[in-house]
Image (cartoon, helix red, strand yellow):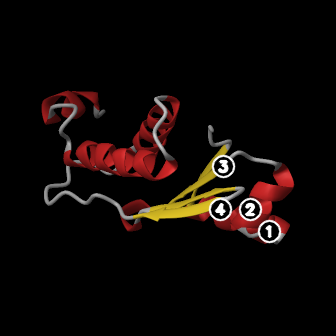
Amino acid sequence: MLFRSKADEEEWQVFVRATGLDAATAVKRHKWQGLLITKGDRGGEFFAASERQSWSATIPTNRASETGAGDVFTAGFGSAVLEGESSLNSLKFAAALAGKHVAGEWLPGSVMDSLET
């Protein structure tokens, strides 16, 4: 199963105001295989036709940058699903991966600093 839609909390609220649909109804009506709603440091929710999962963010004590954490989360979730993991295990993996990104464990700070203009 691959998710078909991803939104952060603000984007999702725009959709809800425009359509009046809650997440479970939207998944069924639009025949999405799944929907990820990310909520920053509060984790998020995953909806599919027959399941609903929520997760907590993995919040590191040292935060380098939160920019892009949702994208890292989404990529981690998708890659774990493609490897055959359950949605729950995929969410846990993605949360840990996004936490490492926020902590700056993947790119040295000097690389990030050199990208700033």
Whichever of callouts 1 and 2 sits on the residue coming sooner in the sequence is 2
The answer to whether one can see residue 67 in this image is no
Q: Which of marks 2 and 3 is in front?
A: 3
Q: Which mark is residue 15?
A: 2
Residue 76 vs 98, above or below: the answer is: above
Label 3 sits on a secondary structure element that is loop
Label 2 sits on a secondary structure element that is helix
Whichever of callouts 4 and 1 sits on the residue coming sooner in the sequence is 4
Mark 1 and mark 2: span between their CA atoms?
Answer: 8 Å
Q: Which of marks 4 and 3 is in front?
A: 3
The residue labelled by disc 3 is 34
The one of 13 and 47 positioned closer to us in this rendering: 47
Instruction: Verify CB contact (< 8 Å) between mark 4 and mark 2.
Output: yes
Mark 3 and mark 1: span between their CA atoms?
Answer: 15 Å
The answer to whether one can see residue 93 in this image is yes
Q: Residue 87 carries which label?
A: none
The residue labelled by disc 4 is 12
Whichever of callouts 2 and 3 sits on the residue coming sooner in the sequence is 2
Whichever of callouts 3 and 1 sits on the residue coming sooner in the sequence is 1
